[in-house]
Image (tube, rainbow, N blue to C red):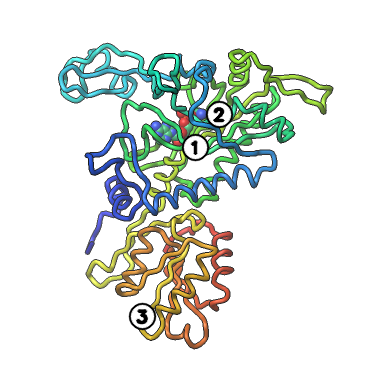
Amino acid sequence: MTGMADTAVTMDKIVSLAKRRGFVFQSSEIYGGLSGAWDYGPQGIELKNRIARFWWKEMTQLHDNIVGIDAAILMHPRVWHASGHVENFTDPLVDCKKCKTRFRADQIPPENLAAKKCPECGGELTETRKFNLMFKTTLGPVEDESGLVYLRPETAQGIYVNFKNVQQSNRMKIPFGIAQIGKAFRNEIVTKNFIFRTCEFEQMEMQFFVKPGTDMEWFEYWREQRWNYYQKLGIDMNKLRWHRHGPDELAHYAKDAYDIEFEFPMGFKELEGVHNRSDYDLSRHQQFSGKDLQYIDQDNGNERYIPNIIETSAGLTRQLLMLLCDSYEEQKVADKGNDDDWRTVLHFHPAVAPITVAVLPLMKKDGLAELAQEIRAELKEDFVTDYDQSGAIGRRYRRQDEVGTPFCVTIDYQTKEDSTITIRDRDSMLQERVPRMRISEYIRHKIKDYKRPERRL
Ligand code: GAP
């Protein structure tokens, strides 16, 4: 890239970088791909695991009254009757009889819907019909209705059905929460925008059980907590906003609901939902299972009630896309009139970057490579490391910038003399000399104290 450049972040650039640098690949690509499914490469899985860890720590470790579970994807089919998904988890669907394109009826212009006219080719549209988004499969060898099970479309229900198990086994007192991270499946009619909306994805959900009447207070508390989370993650807060659900948008279970929206290259879109689910879920499961799901408040004369639930529901894979978009930058860093003037850099929070530290010997010769390998071996107990000895040092820094590695440790001739190395900061590109013995401590501090810089360079 030379001269004036268009540095706008576009989805095409993100998709291309994600593939080129091993973050995300199309599912079954050699067979032409499968729409709505994506594979996470070496950098992608590290990033995804790290985001999950960041969220898990935030929700469980930093909140004394939240514990985690990992429920099965396959659940008793009655769960989905009780939850309302069999009846209500539908999208309105129309097809064009001419070009065969399929649309969600609520996503095409109302005048087209009224005139039954395809927005793509002008052909005739079918009647709108309801389409249930749950994937079905069968349990056991006979493929009939008796073995029908669903792939869970949300992780939340696995928490509700375990409410009593968790509360009693861990002697939890209301208010308390249960967190879970896991796969969810939805037969989405329209999957587009890369990993934004897919048929297989991951959610990070937390269900917080509260006494009826205190629900609005906790709802506000969790709205604030979730907003602050993104600040901690180092996201550009100007790209986030709240969207309150209007009466026509509220899900069948919701008393009140807000989305946190992020400004993706294709505009502001939902990132996470914070929902006041009232006592809908536990009442329904009590009704459908016949089991008493009331909480007995032993500190208050054994008062019994069905708890209300405040839910925070984030997409893990969608958060990964947000991080790619938010951290992506093309920067002019020199003025020599060639490609080296520019770098593409991902400014991930160092706690979630796929590689934390890259170890780079300035030269391969004179024992520097061996020394660098030794230092890498010391660091890899504590951090995910990379080692790169090929090419000019500037090029190697650029390669690390492109996958968002926050720290590059360079071993040079001085290292041989006084056991110091340089650590280059990805964002400022500044280098500091640090004693070899202090590298881990230095990096740990930097990660702990990280704040998104006002200006990155
Ligand atoms: N338990 C409530 C629930 O599932 P939702 O608004 O349907 O609520 C929550 O989903 C979050 O899950 C969304 O904000 C989004 O981040 C993620 N999500 C939902 N559908 C998705 C899809 N098809 N692909 C990727 N992420 C999705």
Query: Alpha-carbon neighbours of circle 3 within 10 Å: few (<14), some, or many (≥20)?
Result: some
The residue that appears at 71% across and 35% down in the rendered structure is: 170
Which one is earlier in the sequence, the residue at label 2 or at label 1?
A: 2
Q: CA distance from mark 3 to mark 2?
A: 54 Å
Labels 3 and 2 touching (C-beta < 8 A): no
Looking at the rendered image, the quarter that the N terminus falls into is: bottom left
Assign a secondary structure to mark 2: helix
Q: CA distance from mark 3 to mark 1?
A: 44 Å
> Where does ligand 1 appear, by image quarter?
top left
The residue that appears at 15% across and 19% down in the rendered structure is: 98
Q: Which x, y percent locates residue 276?
A: 58, 26
The residue that appears at 50% across and 65% down in the rendered structure is: 380
| 299 and 369: which is toward the camera | 369
Residue 111 drawn above or below residue 34: above
Amino acid type, callout 3: Met
Q: Which x, y percent locates residue 202?
A: 45, 37
Assign a secondary structure to mark 3: loop
Labels 3 and 1 touching (C-beta < 8 A): no
Amino acid type, callout 2: Gly
Looking at the rendered image, the quarter that the C terminus falls into is: bottom left
Q: Is residue 192 left or right of residue 321?
A: left
Residue 47 drawn above or below residue 396: above
Q: Which x, y percent locates residue 338?
A: 22, 69
Question: Label 3, on which residue?
Answer: 363
Question: Label 2, on which residue?
Answer: 158
Q: Which x, y percent locates residue 105?
A: 31, 19
Which one is earlier in the sequence, the residue at label 3 or at label 1?
A: 1
Question: Which quarter of the figure has residue 261?
Answer: top left
Question: Label 1, on which residue?
Answer: 182
The residue that appears at 75% across and 19% down in the rendered structure is: 304
Q: CA distance from mark 2 to mark 1?
A: 10 Å
